[in-house]
């Protein structure tokens, strides 16, 4: 996986060309996706609002994730990522959401260290994924996750706008 400055510029160009603002809801990536995106000159032209929603409460309160989804599937699930992405659309026209485990300290029986579920939403389209980073160090896991998500987000943009 290699995310380049050119990929980030392509994200910027695609969103600004369509006058679309992006919102992000990050959990396991801890704001790293937001940081990478705001490294791009002119980020204020395509970013609306970003959240780091680590707790279930934050996901419910700010991203409109139903408590019933968290109770049934857990916060680290594809269902939660999809609801996060959909909930972010109240703030912007397109969204990125991540939830997972960057380390094994608080893992569960379904998901191991390095697991991230992520989703993108635009209008009535939601696309979700599961990715498992094979990196060992927590910081490297987060970096790997963030780069993978942004690479897939660029693919998502190319799919829906080509």
Image (cartoon, rainbow, N blue to C red):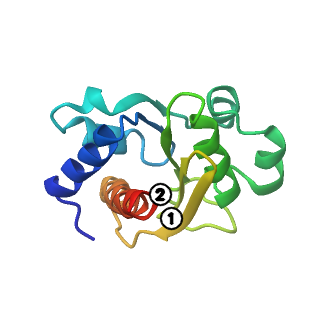
How many labels were placed on the picture? 2
- Provide residue 49's location: percent of width, then percent of height: 43, 27
Q: Name the disc covering residue 29, or none.
A: none
User: Could you tell me which quadrant the C terminus lies in?
Assistant: bottom left
**Residue behind mark 2:** 103
Q: What's the distance in space between the residues labelled 1 and 2, CA to CA?
A: 5 Å
Q: Secondary structure at mark 2?
A: loop
User: Could you tell me which quadrant the N terminus lies in?
Assistant: bottom left
Nearest the camera: 2 or 121? Answer: 121
- Provide residue 28's location: percent of width, then percent of height: 48, 48
Q: Secondary structure at mark 1?
A: loop
Left or right side of 157 for 7:
left
**Residue behind mark 1:** 113
Left or right side of 152 for 90:
right
- Provide residue 90's location: percent of width, then percent of height: 60, 29
Nearest the camera: 17 or 117? Answer: 17
- Provide residue 23's location: percent of width, then percent of height: 46, 35
Residue in view at x 47 percent, y 57 percent: 103
Q: Are marks 1 and 2 in contact (CB under 8 Å)?
A: yes
With respect to residue 122, does 59 lie above or below?
Answer: above
Residue in view at x 23 percent, y 61 percent: 3
Nearest the camera: 69 or 134? Answer: 69
With respect to residue 3, does 20 lie above or below?
Answer: above
Residue in view at x 48 percent, y 42 percent: 94
Closer to the chain start, of discs 1 and 2, is 2
Residue in view at x 64 percent, y 49 percent: 124
Q: Label 1: how many residues lie within 10 Å, few (<14), some (14-19) or many (20+)? A: many
With respect to residue 35, does 154 lie above or below?
Answer: below
Q: Label 2: how many residues lie within 10 Å, few (<14), some (14-19) or many (20+)? A: some
With respect to residue 22, does 7 lie above or below?
Answer: below
């Amino acid at each position: 996986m290699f995310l380049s400055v050119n990929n980030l510029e392509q994200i910027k160009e695609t969103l600004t060309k369509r006058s679309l603002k992006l919102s992000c809801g990050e959990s396991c990536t801890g704001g790293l996706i937001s940081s990478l995106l705001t490294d791009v000159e002119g980020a204020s032209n395509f970013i609306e609002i970003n959240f780091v929603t680590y707790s279930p409460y934050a996901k419910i309160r700010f991203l409109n994730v139903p408590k019933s989804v968290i109770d049934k599937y857990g916060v680290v699930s594809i269902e939660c990522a999809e609801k996060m992405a959909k909930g972010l659309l109240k703030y912007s026209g397109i969204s990125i959401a991540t939830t997972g485990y960057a380390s094994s300290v608080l893992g569960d029986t379904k998901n191991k260290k390095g697991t991230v579920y992520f989703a993108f939403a635009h209008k009535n389209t939601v696309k979700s994924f599961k990715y498992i980073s094979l990196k060992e160090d927590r910081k490297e896991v987060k970096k790997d996750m963030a780069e993978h998500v942004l690479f897939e987000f660029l693919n998502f943009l190319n799919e829906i706008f080509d």
